[in-house]
Image: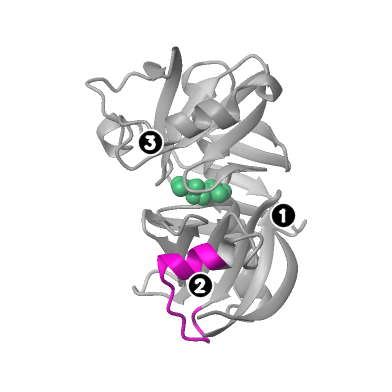
């Protein structure tokens, strides 16, 4: 199958973006893994597929696949790239679009300064809906991770996140502990593991070991989940600037029941074609 693609990134969280509106695409988990492979394929953290809307109240459908081949519910850095892509490709003249994802509708908007703002929807805090196996919906809950007991906040941005506060993200055991948390039995759909360091009431540092991709340079939904966490724990106030290894995101959240707004960059790197069997 010959495939036209565009390579993009949001703060170094990188994507292969595929237009499935103007080309027919048949993606299997194996094909996704091959396309995402940084040695045998193109290489990316996630693969984003642009499809025609399946309902009248949205402009497009947005499908997201992790590098491990699994399809997931949401991708924040990808949402910013999505709107830049459909605009650059002439698929829409709108600067703000409504996009249907597996976990609901998001609304990315191209700003005049070149950044992109996305209404990422309302965070889910009920454990059963994250999903997180627990008899409590408490904001902070203990989680046994190997020999350590860590205090996490379980929150869904459509996709599941387990967020902990650490003294120094650079020293945090992201690789070892992140891998254990990702596959922890209390997260039946697996989970993205966030590590947050407080800088001040409006600034945090964040690293995320992503479900299905490992540590990435930035995670948009992870930044949203981290801001929800530090605000719920009364450690910070909105808006919060999130420093990731790939750069900075600005997140605003008005509290439970309110949507999370994320603002940051989206960059097109190159376009190409690939033959994949
Ligand atoms: N690994 C995530 C999907 C990508 C999210 C991330 N790249 C973002 O920017 O939100 C998951 O399995 O839920």
Residue 103: x and y in percent read 36, 53
The label on residue 160 is none
Read off the magenta span.
20-34
Q: Quadrant of residue 123?
A: top left
Please report whichever mark, 3 or 2, sits nearer to the chain's N-terminal start. 2
Label 1 beta carbon within 8 A of ligand 1: no
Mark closer to the observer (1, 3): 1
The label on residue 50 is 2
Q: Secondary structure beneath disc 3? A: loop
Residue 24: x and y in percent read 46, 85
Q: In 3D space, how far apart are the residues under numbered discs 2 and 1 (Cα atoms)?
A: 20 Å
Residue 119 is a magenta residue: no
Residue 120: x and y in percent read 49, 48
Residue 186: x and y in percent read 30, 29
Is 271 on the left or on the right of 153, as rendered? right
Residue 26 is a magenta residue: yes
Residue under label 1: 115
Q: Secondary structure beneath disc 2? A: strand
Residue 111 appears in the picture as rendered: yes
Residue under label 3: 257
Identify whether 115 is placed above or below 225: below
Colouring scheme applied when the structure was drawn? one colour
Is 123 on the left or on the right of 45, as rendered? left
Identify whether 221 is placed above or below 167: below
């Amino acid at each position: 199958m010959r495939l036209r693609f565009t390579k993009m990134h949001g703060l170094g969280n990188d994507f292969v973006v595929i237009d499935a509106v103007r080309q027919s695409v048949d993606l299997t988990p194996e094909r996704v893994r091959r396309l995402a492979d940084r040695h045998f394929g193109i290489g990316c953290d996630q693969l984003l597929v642009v499809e025609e809307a399946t309902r009248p109240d949205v402009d497009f459908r947005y499908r997201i696949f992790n590098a491990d081949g699994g399809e997931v519910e949401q991708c924040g850095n990808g949402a910013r790239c999505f709107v830049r892509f459909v605009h650059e490709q002439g698929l829409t003249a709108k600067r703000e679009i409504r996009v249907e994802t597996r976990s609901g509708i998001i609304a990315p908007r191209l700003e005049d300064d070149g950044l992109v703002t996305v209404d990422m929807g309302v965070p889910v805090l009920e454990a059963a809906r994250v999903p997180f196996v627990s008899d409590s919906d408490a904001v902070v809950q203990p989680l046994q991770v190997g020999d350590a007991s860590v205090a996490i906040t379980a929150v869904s941005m459509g996709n599941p996140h387990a967020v902990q506060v650490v003294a120094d993200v650079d020293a945090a055991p992201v690789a070892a502990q992140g891998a254990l948390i990702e596959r922890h039995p209390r997260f039946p759909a697996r989970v993205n593991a966030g590590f947050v360091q407080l800088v001040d009431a409006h600034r945090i540092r964040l690293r995320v070991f992503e479900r299905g991709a490992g540590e990435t340079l930035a995670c948009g939904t992870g930044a949203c989940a981290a801001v929800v966490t530090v605000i719920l724990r009364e450690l910070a106030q909105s808006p919060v600037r999130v420093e990731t290894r790939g750069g900075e995101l600005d997140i605003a959240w008005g509290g439970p029941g309110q949507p999370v707004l994320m603002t940051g960059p989206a960059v097109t790197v190159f376009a190409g074609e690939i033959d994949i069997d």
